[in-house]
Image (cartoon, rainbow, N blue to C red):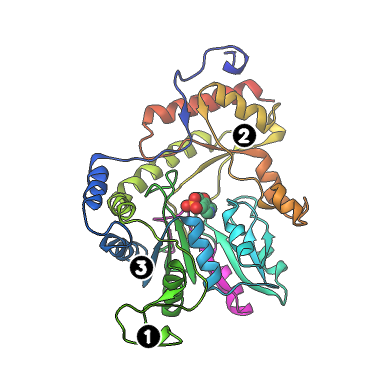
Amino acid sequence: MEELAVFGGDPVRKTPIHYGRQCIEEDDIAAVVEALRSDLITCGPRNEELEEKLCEITGARYAVAVANGTAALHLAAMAAGFGEGDEVIVSAITFAASANCVLYCGARPVFADIRPDTWNIDPESVERLITSRTRGIVAVDFTGQAVEHDALRRICEKNGLILIEDAAHAIGTKYKGQPVGSIADMTCFSFHPVKTVTGGEGGAITTDDEQLYHRLMRLRTHGITRSQEEMVHPTDAKWYNEQVELGFNYRMTDFQAALLLSQLNKLPKFAERRKELVRKYDQAFRDMPEISIQREIPESDTVRHLYVLRLKPDRLTCDRRQFFDALYAENVCAQVHYLPVYWHSYYEKLGYVKGLCPNAESYYEEVMSLPLYYQLTDADAEDVIRAVNKVVEYYRK
Ligand SMILES: *Cc1c(COP(=O)(O)O)cnc(C)c1O
């Protein structure tokens, strides 16, 4: 048997390959340069164009561009009216920001378990957690796969809850043919460089609700309004604006909006390549007894942000840490998404204990995300597959 690089053998690849990276092309750079030469470099015409483009892609009536995905979640949670004494149900397997936005509002995140095979929030777990204090759900389209909207909508309608969809992974994904972004009460996107399209930093909220839209726009700029209808002391003086509530500066610059517009034009080709790579990986790993792959619900037409490899510990002599380190030594630099949010020491200090979400916890112990991005070549993907095969062979029971 070939010796693993971690024990001194030759690595599958000479150069490291990372789990994600942006694709910035010359026309993206030109778009940014052009924006920098214009009069308005923040919150100008390109922000408006970006918002129109997001409406076009998602089918939502309104879009609000913001500084990043976390700001999008924060504003959505505020606009939802979450506050002191409220409970909001959040997926346990997600980036901490999905739950932090609830804390920002003084409300308490309550963590729902994931399904053991799709790894998305389990509507049955959500239902069990509902109390008289529950106000909403933050559901994450994990890896890009749409959450079970039909089930979640039934729960929300029955209990009067607001659904915020954290679609940071899921731009381009559809549920029953309908684009993510036009389904939940509010949908939040992130345009961080590892995501499918990027603005360097960037985020957005989409909604069909006019009132939520106006509130989000106001909160994005300090809670200040120029609309007489929203003022306590209305006047038609041209210089007058009024702060009517406590908001933030969560604006996006116009050169970031320019980059995002250029990137969004490429979403179809980015999405297609990601789907191709997912098919390639699935084909390679589907029949390996040591590995499980993510189950896709038929309703979701998924643009994947992450490709997760899940080990079957009873089929291997190594644990996840050893497997991960071995892959790393082969120069395949995986990552782990995610620690159950309530395992973070900050949440531990808030009183959350281990054992809350057993599926999420065993998921976390067994997974790693493989390289997945637009510019990953077929040869790169084959290297990744060879490296996984090599490590599996070495540790096979
Ligand atoms: C990236 C991400 C965020 C945060 O987005 P930023 O733009 O980095 O603030 C929130 N939720 C999920 C699930 C993410 O992956």
Q: What amino acid type is highlighted by mark number 2?
A: Pro
Q: Which residues are magenta?
A: 148-176
Q: What amino acid type is highlighted by mark number 3?
A: Gly
Q: Residue at x 39, y 55 (%)?
A: 172
Q: Earlier in the sequence, mark 2 or mark 1?
A: 1
Q: CA distance from mark 2 to mark 1?
A: 65 Å
Q: CA distance from mark 2 to mark 3?
A: 41 Å
Q: CA distance from mark 3 to mark 1?
A: 30 Å
Spot occupied by residue 114 in the image (x, y as percentages of width and height) = 64, 55
Ligand 1 lies under 8 Å from the Cβ of mark 1 = no
Q: Earlier in the sequence, mark 2 or mark 3?
A: 3
Spot occupied by residue 303 in the image (x, y as percentages of width and height) = 42, 50
Q: Nearer the viewer, residue 367 or 41?
A: 41
Q: Is residue 130 above or below residue 340?
A: below
Foreground disc of the pair 2, 1: 1
- Which residue has dot 1 on it? 228
Q: For the C terminus, which image quadrant?
A: top right
Q: Quadrant of residue 27?
A: top left
